[in-house]
Amino acid sequence: MQSWQGAAARLPRLGQRPPEPGGAAGAPAAEAAGRSPHVRRIPRFAAVGVTGFAVNSVLLLVLHGLLHAPLLPAAAAATEAAILCNFALNDAWTFRDAARALPRWRRAVRYNGVALGGLAISLSVLTAITALAGDGAYLLANVAGVVSATGWNCVVGSRRAWSGSGSTVLPLRRLAGEGGLVLTLSFLLYLGLAAWLVLKVGLLAGDGISRTANAYYVLFSRDPHLAAVGFVWNPLPSLVQIPLLLFKDVWPALATRGFAGDIQSAAFMAGAAYQLNRALAELGTRRVPRVLITLLFALDPMVMFYGWDGMSEASLLFAMLMTARHLARWAREGELRWLVLSGVGLAIGYTTRYETAAAALGVTLFVVGLTLWRGGETWRRRAWNALADAVAVASPFALVFTGWAAASWILVGAPFAQFSSVYGNSSQVSMEQATHPPLLTGAVQALGQMEHMEPLWLVVLVLAAIVGVLRRDAAIPAIASVFCSVLAFMFLTRVTGMILPWFRYFIELVPMVGLLLGAVWSDPAPERGHGGGTGPARPRRCWVGPLKSGAAALTALVLLAPALPVSALAMANPSIAPEEAADLRPLYAHAPETFRITEEVAVARYLDRMHLAAGSVLLDADAGFAIVLNSDNPHQFVITPDYDFESDLADPRAAGVRYMLVPRRGGVGSADALNRAYPSLYATGAGFATLVHDFSDPSLGSSDLGWRLYRVVGSPGS
Amino acid sequence: MIRLHRTQGGPGSGLLAAIEPSPLNRSVGGLRRDHPEMSAHTVLVAWQRRVLLGLVGLATLGAAVAPAGTAIALIAVFTAAYLFVMGYNALLLRATLRNPRVLCVGDEEAFAVADRDLPRYTVMIAAYHEAAVIARTLRSVAALDYPRDRLEVKLLLEADDTETIAAALAAQPGPEVEIVRVPVASPRTKPKALNYGLALSAGELVTVYDAEDMPEPLQLRRAAVALARADESVACLQAQLYYHNQDQNLLTRLFAAEYASWFATALPAMAELGAPLPLGGTSMHVRRDALERIGGWDPHNVTEDADLGIRLHRMGFRTEVLGSVTLEEANSDPVNWVKQRSRWYKGYIQTWLVHMREPRRVWRELGGRGVAGLAAVVAGTPLLSLLNPLFWLLTAVWLVGGTAVRELYPAWLYYPAVLSLVLGNFLALYRIAVSVRSSGHPELLSAVLLWPAYWVWMSVAAVRAVAQLTISPWFWEKTVHGLEHLAGAG
């Protein structure tokens, strides 16, 4: 009897979860026990309270004082931000040694739930005081509100969120705390940047705001339907804005200034920083270099720029980092779940940008190669395993790829509208670049841009290749397979003149060097399935760790930090970064070259005053999206996503259209459907329309599209 | 000396020996008498019949008054069902990838226990008209590595099946094997025979094998060690079933991929999700005390195995998956496959109806997650197979441009339906593809490509199952293939 029980007792009890594999790498040893946790907690809780108050006040000052957002929504947003900030700090710091019966998200939800009670208290106090003392006392009123809410949180909140019956302390807690902080702080950073640049300085990114418009048509056009999101640009950045736009009546800038898009890109870019940080933690990069690399990524000028401006770079970076993170983990650990998550990353990537297809190809080839290399005893077995692994990683992407093409084919008659549509990339290229430079010149230009994006990228790549080969660390080629295939694709299409020479197309360099450098300085866990298992840790001298951390941090600083000033300067140089330089110009020069929508706003105001019935104004939304976004009466327009646009264009009068809006021909205006259908419309009215108003404003420079409003007086050809 | 956890007292425990005068009576009517609410003797209880009739009446009335509206409402309900099953599929996939919950006992651990410390084990084999394979069956039993003095094997043969009895005697089984002649009585089902065998046996642990099974020799030792180590609520272990004839033809490859996905990933994932596990008919290892407490098998349920897992869970006993494989013979003939599958579907519907008799009580006993698992797997599998042809037809008409179908899908229904069509099908196939890889049979990927054809065949079985359920609910359709044997794999 003894022996059987003995044998049973030696092993972990069944039915219990095994400890979370991986991930713990880099987690510091538990704090020395013995000290009472409360001695530390009380000052920490107070400090966190002060931080929360600071966050709250600063945000309120920015939102209400500077940006003149309405007081109540502004205070609510400020308080919610402070709640999340407090939770992250308390969870990672104050209560890091507390028992946690609940998973992190449930703690956050609970904390938030209690804190929302606090918010209610805070808002009531705020309203009461401002009602009594006038709106001018809002900062003082806010102090009173926050103090009462803190009292409530202190008494109820921490107890609800952190105490529980369970006594196990999650080993990943501090790491999770770090990731949460990266996510929260970088989101606030990009969002704050967006608020300042868009709402205060008045910058707008045209591509970004057109994505917002695509989401807007889905909800608010005369003919609301999901397919109105359009098939020229991949839909993710627009789709995630749909819920945000539901609040456009509460805060019109969400639509009129495209701020929903800015929230979108800030969230995705924060997610990208989070993925990078987690990837480094899972690779086993030590804390100091890990935080440093994360910071150098999050604070890179290009990353910050595309974090605020509402475009799709942020979601692309998020998806590629997610793919690379899990692929690297799969390469080391061989567990199928990481491969599946990597495949999900690719699928998300394709919903946001076409170049993901290159990554999907690169990743699939890498996976097949690695499995053939190590995946079984016989070649036959390896081949089947390689095929199965390829299916696991590539089929989510394949589903999105075919689904998107099929939907596009069914709804707009072309599977790849990006390339075939007059509004798509190919058309833009031929429009803006009558003759593309010779191959060599293009290659030199592209390399120059890459140097300005990340001056030492080649050094990092070579270093990583050497370390990867010496250490036989499959994580390094895994990372490279994601980013290098996208970069190679961008380089080749750029050199052959298939895409425009934008600086941002090489933004993948930034996460790539960060991840590779992290992998170079990581402590890879022994690979599984090679007779390895977790052997006993080699005894180390106590100074080895800090020394390694220091060396890693120093390398990161030397190799990555130069990118910050170099790309910041490049972004002001129109010959390297034409888009960014134009967008950022108002920051340092009074320049009419900037993209503005004042003309479109004027058109919208003019039309709104006419109180037209639904479907009265024919407009191609490709150039005129800002008119629709800024109109109070979006139903008055018949726009390109509407199912009846084509027939209305053929005979506007018969369809009940009374007015037509046309931009000047040339540039964006040449793709305009009205100009294409009636080439003489803009100049003369094409024989069936008379000019009502000309909105041209030469002071706007290139933003002046010269909109003209024509009244329909006959039928074309009559 | 606590080796196996035991549940003390409670209704039903010890009843077999003490009260019951005749093992036969008990094996036929025991469950019906002790737990009438859990017996499939009645298909529908009164309120279920009323609700069903009411729904049918409502649909008929609706079809007469407002046909379009009724059609839309029905499609909406069915689409919701599809989305629910799709969501559960996604959860299963996630659980499969994150934490495959299979209890593994290594060879060393299995041998570390001295023979005298092992619990007494009862192995039951129910066979009917299996003269051809019974000798092989006995060889597989002989190959089991378990001390003979702690093992009893009950070969349960129908008293009138003289051929098989003769064949079994001719094979000269070892002293641990007892040939039990089960008296002829209705219903002639495997669970009745198992109840009879249970009453005549005494092992602390009980397992069941089918006639053509080839269990891995260490399975009993592994199960004994795992059960002793698991916590008290774990009363049952389901070993993993797989086929030895997967390369026989296309059907066996499809079947093998399905089993790989079911036993290697879906069941462990369900265990992880806290759902009751519909057991397989063989190679489940149960503590006798639990088995007696729940009243044994339901002789009127044609998937007594699935029902047993759910009843165990309802009475507070959990089931886990044991990392040990039993090889079976896959059904290689399409017609027989349909017969077997329609019995399974019939039994699943029976089982679900039985366990939905007292919804509030079931909710209390299984919890929300358990009820969700029950609905998605036990009700969802036959129901969706039944509905599939209708929706394939609608999709086909829609794709060739039928405007009538467009009318049936207003925007609020259209988007969820497209999501279900695209993502639901993808997830189902992707889960199987991932399963065959993670269970170590990547060569079955070729079968995954043909899965839609397999779905068609499942639908045929589902239609047949519903027809049979209304005509002869307890009729156990014997699976016939090269070798005649009871119950096939189920």
Image (cartoon, rainbow, N blue to C red):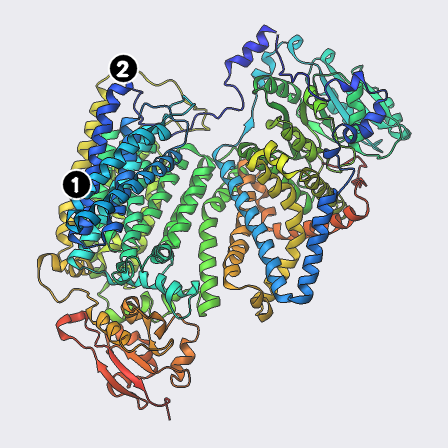
**A599 or B51, nearer to the observer:** B51
**Residue holding disc 1:** A561
Residue A186 pos. (x, y %): 25, 43
Q: Is residue A193 left or right of residue B1?
A: left
| Residue A243 visible in this rendered orientation of the protein | yes
Q: Quadrant of residue B285?
A: top right
Reading the chain from its start, which is encountered first: label 2 or label 1?
2
* SS at badge 1: loop
Q: How many marks?
A: 2
Same chain under badges 2 and 1? The reply is yes
Three-letter amino acid code of the residue under disc 1:
Ala
* Residue that lies at the very extreme toward the top in this rendered image: A2
| Residue B38 left/right relative to B450 | right
Secondary structure under the numbered disc 2 in the rendered image = loop
Q: Residue at x 32, y 65 (%)?
A: A425
Rate crowding at label 2 as few (under 14), some (14 to 19) or many (20 or more) other CA atoms within 10 Å: few
The structure residue drawn at horizontal position 21% and vertical position 52%, both measured from the top left corner, is A195
Q: How would you rate the neighbour count of disc 1 (Cα within 10 Å): few for under 14, some for 14-19, many for 20 or more? A: many
- The residue to which callout 2 is attached is A35
> Percent x, y for residue B189?
81, 34
Residue A680 is drawn in which quadrant?
bottom left
Q: Picture quarter containing residue B405? A: bottom right
Mark linked to residue A82 = none
